[in-house]
Amino acid sequence: MATTKNILSEQIQRIYARFIDKNNVSDAIDLREIKLLVNQSINKVLKLQVAESFKAGLVDVPKCNLIEYTCAVTSDSGNSRAYITLPAIPITLPMDMGIWSIAAPTAAMSPYIPIPAQDVLVFQGTNVSALEQQIGYYVQGKLVYFTKDITLSANGSITSVKVNLLVSDFSVINDNDLLPISPEVETTIMEDVLNTLGAGKISQVELQTQQSKQ
């Protein structure tokens, strides 16, 4: 059954309250604090899942981890290039794959080409020339540089781009929106938050009993 951050948080609150005082169940901890922990736990659990998937050679990325941002483009005319500042830190993956795609707003099916930053620096642009008329980008810290100044009319007069980042940021999902996670992940998140609260490892039976009451 699908769940929300509110439902998860309330379940955790009840279980934790019974852990503190089984004979006098009350709101033993502020629900707002639990929601913050739920956000953190979801981010951590799904980040680990994606990282393990890539280690296994899989590229089946959960769609809930792909978040689209609109980023303003700044000209760096002195270096014949332009750049954007990443709005969030993507998951650290080989070949900067945490940045899933960058494209002009009207060219979603023709994204810019990623170039490993070390190639740009070590080969001093040799690989960049192989792009011919296409435009690439490379990452340095929180900045993403394009191989041409895309703000110029000759390169499209681009003032903003659509950036799809592979991130674990569930703070952007409202408390009552359905979470795109499986029941197994729900249980892992509940256990993780309860352990953080110091309630120890809650048995699978107790967690399943709580979930069946919803």
Image (cartoon, helix red, strand yellow):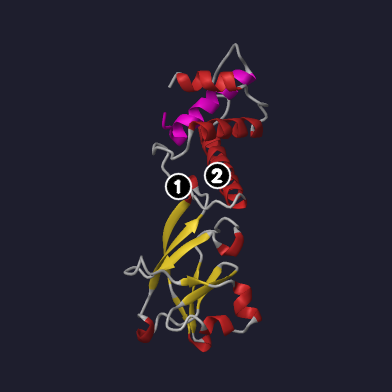
Q: Is mark 2 on a helix, strand or loop?
A: helix
Q: Name the residue at the bottom extreme.
A: 78
For the point 60% across and 46% down, the residue is 48
Inspect the magenta stretch and tell me whether residue 18 lies in it: yes
From the image, tell me which residue sits under label 2.
46
66, 175: nearer the viewer = 66
Q: Are marks 1 and 2 in contact (CB under 8 Å)?
A: yes
Q: Can residue 187 be seen in this view?
A: yes
Q: Can residue 17 be seen in this view?
A: no
Query: Which image quarter: residue 202?
Result: top right
Q: How many circles with numbers are drawn on the protein?
A: 2
Q: Residues within 10 Å of mark 1 (few under 14, many from 20)?
A: some
In 3D space, how far apart are the residues under numbered discs 1 and 2 (Cα atoms)?
9 Å
For the point 57% across and 19% down, the residue is 206
What span is colored magenta in the figure?
A: 1-20
From the image, tell me which residue sits under label 1.
64
Most common secondary structure along the magenta stretch? helix
Inspect the magenta stretch and tell me whether residue 61 lies in it: no
Q: Is mark 1 on a helix, strand or loop?
A: helix
The amino acid type found where label 2 is placed reads: Leu
4, 62: nearer the viewer = 62
For the point 52% across and 59% down, the residue is 88
